[in-house]
Image (spheres, rainbow, N blue to C red):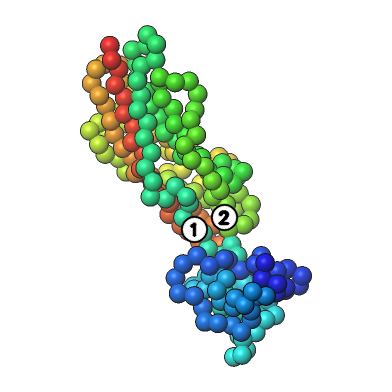
Amino acid sequence: MSGFFSNGVDLDNLFSPYRSGTKAGNTGFRRSDGYDLAQLYQPRGSTTKRANVGFRLSDGRDLSELFEAKGAALVALAFNGNSYTAAGRPRNNNTVAEAELQLIFKADGNWEIVRYVSQTTGAQSLANGSWRNAGGSSGEYKVQFIVSTGGEFPGSLGLNNQASSAQPLGSQRMCAVSIGGSDRVPRSAWADVTARLTGPQGQTVDSKLRFTVSAVAEL
């Protein structure tokens, strides 16, 4: 905590923690350990200014002019830049092989990446986290899944995109890719998925991943 309070609320709860870029110049307000507040918070940049907090620089500006309001900016989600794979094989005496990967944005504010393959039962959770990182309620956010495909058998790729245009996240939204086969021909394809999240103030952020699915039925 910063030890500085505005109307009883610590500034840590009013400004975004520092993430990246050039830090603001020193403010003259120091935490008990000697750190200037400029070391703690993200510069405001072009984000919307929050209400004044009552701490002013020597030039008269309120700290709200200097630092980004908590929740004013979205940040890329933890899966950004990652790749996920699913390889389907027949199970027991079945001659069909299937594989599927799903990116799910849940209405409770969390996301999850799930894998299904025909040789096992049930889903395997590969990764998860929170997408609601700028405060507010789920219904104030929207997501759009932008998908491009390729690989050896892109025509065999199944796509279930529940948000090809921006959709509110008061309800769960999913983007799933799948592939299947019932012969000895190995099939594989990939899909690049961009999840474009729009926040309560109209701010947006893109988080990108690659799904690769393959299937071969060994008769």
Residue placed most toward the observer, 113 or 166: 113
Give the side of residue 183 with respect to residue 35, left or right: left
Marks 2 and 1 in Cβ contact (< 8 Å): yes
Q: Where, by quadrant of the figure, is residue 54 drawn? A: bottom right
Is residue 212 left or right of 21 when viewed as pictured? Answer: left
- For this rendering, which residue is in front, 14 or 198? 14
Which mark, residue 27? none
SS type, badge 1 = loop
Residue drawn where x is 54% and y is 50% of the image: 131
Looking at numbered disc 2 in the image, what kind of residue is underneath it? Answer: Asn
Q: Residue at x 28, y 11 (%)?
A: 219
Q: Is residue 72 above or below residue 195?
A: below
Q: Nearer the viewer, residue 34 or 14?
A: 34
Disc 1: which residue: 75
Q: Residue furthest right?
A: 8
- Location of residue 187 with respect to 30 vertically, above or below: above
Residue 6 in picture, x, y percent from top left? 72, 74
Q: Residues within 10 Å of mark 1 (few under 14, many from 20)?
A: some
Q: Position of residue 212 (x, y in %)?
A: 33, 36
Residue designated by label 2: 133
Q: Amino acid at mark 1?
A: Val
- Distance from the alpha carbon under mark 2 to that under mark 1: 7 Å
Residue depicted at x 57% and y 44%: 110
Badge 2, how many Cα within 10 Å: few under 14, some, many 20+?
some
